[in-house]
Image: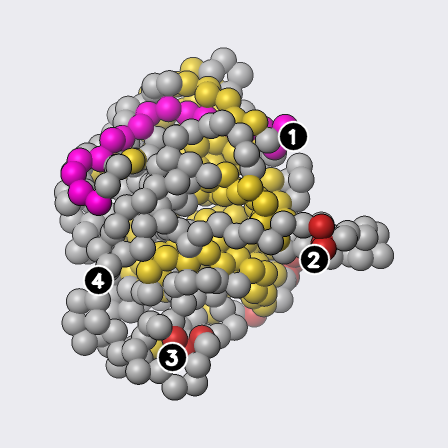
């Protein structure tokens, strides 16, 4: 039985204790005229990247695929848009700046001053080979301008991960296949020096091995890189990976923290959100290789105890699917206090005790909502409503199918 431990509640409360509210929430300190803000929204999209901009107190988003799936099959329509979500008025505003070309499945990371985007894929149309990228870009939060940092480096790829730490970017794994029906997983680990603007191959075959669709995070003290889950050349069907690894950035040695086969571990999954906390690793959503598929679960891994804990279960499987891409109305019992189940979304910590999420892929296509999670109280708040991608049960009491 999955339970939420007292120790976990204390740890998350301690993380959020004493933190200031998001910008604008303290109305006594700052008065904002939200009527002057734009009412535009980004389209629903998956395979999108993003990070928290502490300079301006906003969530920044880049790229993605807004093609609406048909019978669960991708209908690619990539975008080159950059957006910002402002929590003081819960509104979106486009960032109009020349930057990376349209793409999805790239690696996106952020530090205190910039958003970084590397690689990804593009296709003009619904079929054929993809064009893969190897360029690295930086968005300056202070000026809202993109700069090309390097035209080439680790090699063209998609579905890789990248984190920012120690004035460097660390990039690992991915897929080098241009064929949308097959994968060629990679296992190399690279760093990019943000001062000298140079790439360095650190490990040709990193400890966790070849993988794509995995997740990565950095510890708050920037001493440890975490990598979780993903898949290999079988990533269309699974089995997926459920292992959790740690890379000591001082010694450059890998340690497997969990093989994912423990009885209390989360189901193996791809495209989840992963975040480093003090003494813990936080796992949010993703697509598992079981009967549920997309999830809205929240888990933590205790680095001291070496164990997983289920924080919130999210939607629970009810009747199961009728067949491929055929879900009955009662497929799940939904947790309406949590965001829709999803993968390939933006997931970011704001450094002030909140987890933010935008967009991604759902059972009902793609979505464009924004939610925030208060880590102290474990309460989700809907910040911007979805215009697509939610299951019928989130709006109606009686549904004949899972989706509208």
Residue 311 image position (x, y, % from top left): 48, 67
Measuring 27% from the left and 42% from the top, which residue is drawn there?
A: 212
Question: What residue span does the magenta drawing correspond to?
Answer: 126-143
Instruction: Quickly name the residue at label 3.
Output: 333
Q: Which comes sooner in the sequence, label 3 or label 1?
A: 1
Q: Taking the image as drawn, is residue 170 in sight? A: no
Q: Nearer the viewer, mark 2 or mark 1?
A: 1
Residue at 42% from the left image edge and 36% from the top image edge: 80
| Residue corresponding to mark 2 | 17
Say which quarter of the image contains residue 284.
bottom left
Closer to the chain start, of discs 2 and 1, is 2
Cβ–Cβ under 8 Å for marks 2 and 4: no
Q: Nearer the viewer, residue 129 or 297?
A: 129
Q: Is residue 129 magenta?
A: yes
Q: Position of residue 186 (x, y in %)?
A: 24, 34
Residue 142 badge: 1
Say if the magenta span includes residue 306.
Answer: no
Mark 2 or mark 4, whichever is nearer to me:
4
Q: CA distance from mark 1 to mark 4?
A: 42 Å
Instruction: Report how far apart the C-alphas of labels 2 and 3 lie in the structure.
Output: 32 Å
Which label sits in the foreground, 3 or 1? 1
Residue 103 percent coordinates (x, y)? 35, 37
């Amino acid at each position: 039985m999955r339970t939420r431990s007292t120790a976990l509640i204390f740890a998350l409360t301690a993380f959020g204790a004493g933190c200031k509210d998001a910008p604008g929430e303290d109305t006594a300190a700052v008065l904002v005229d939200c009527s002057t803000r734009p009412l535009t929204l980004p389209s629903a999209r998956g395979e999108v990247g993003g990070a928290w901009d502490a300079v301006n107190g906003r969530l920044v988003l880049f790229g993605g695929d807004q093609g609406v799936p048909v019978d669960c099959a991708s209908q690619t329509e990539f975008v080159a848009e950059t957006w910002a979500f402002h929590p003081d008025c819960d509104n979106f505003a486009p960032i109009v700046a020349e930057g990376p070309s349209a793409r999805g499945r790239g690696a996106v990371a952020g530090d205190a001053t910039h958003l970084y985007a590397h690689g990804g894929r593009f296709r003009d149309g619904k079929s054929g080979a993809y064009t893969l990228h190897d360029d690295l870009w930086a968005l300056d939060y202070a000026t809202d301008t993109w700069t090309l940092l390097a035209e080439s480096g680790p090699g063209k790829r998609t579905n890789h991960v990248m984190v920012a730490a120690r004035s460097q970017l660390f990039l690992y794994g991915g897929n080098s296949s241009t064929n949308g029906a097959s994968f060629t997983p990679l296992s190399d680990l690279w760093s990019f020096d943000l001062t000298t603007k140079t790439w360095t191959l650190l490990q040709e075959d990193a400890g966790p091995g070849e993988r794509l669709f995995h997740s990565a995070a950095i510890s708050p003290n920037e001493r440890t890189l975490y990598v979780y889950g993903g898949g290999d050349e079988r990533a269309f069907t699974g089995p997926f990976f459920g292992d959790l690894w740690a890379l000591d950035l001082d010694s450059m040695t890998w340690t497997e923290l969990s093989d994912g086969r423990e009885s209390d571990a989360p189901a193996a999954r791809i495209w989840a959100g992963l975040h480093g906390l003090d003494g813990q690793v936080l796992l949010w959503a993703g697509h598992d290789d079981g009967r549920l598929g997309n999830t809205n679960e929240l888990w933590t891994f205790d680095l001291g105890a070496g164990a997983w804990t289920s924080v919130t279960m999210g939607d629970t499987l009810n009747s199961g699917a009728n067949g491929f891409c055929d879900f009955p109305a009662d497929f799940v019992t939904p947790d309406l206090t949590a965001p829709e189940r999803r993968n390939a979304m933006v997931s970011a910590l704001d450094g002030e005790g909140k987890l933010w999420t935008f967009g991604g892929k759902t059972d009902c296509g793609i979505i464009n909502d924004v939610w925030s999670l208060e880590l102290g109280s474990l309460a989700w708040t809907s910040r911007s409503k979805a215009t697509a991608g939610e299951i019928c049960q989130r709006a109606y009491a009686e549904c004949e199918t899972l989706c509208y």
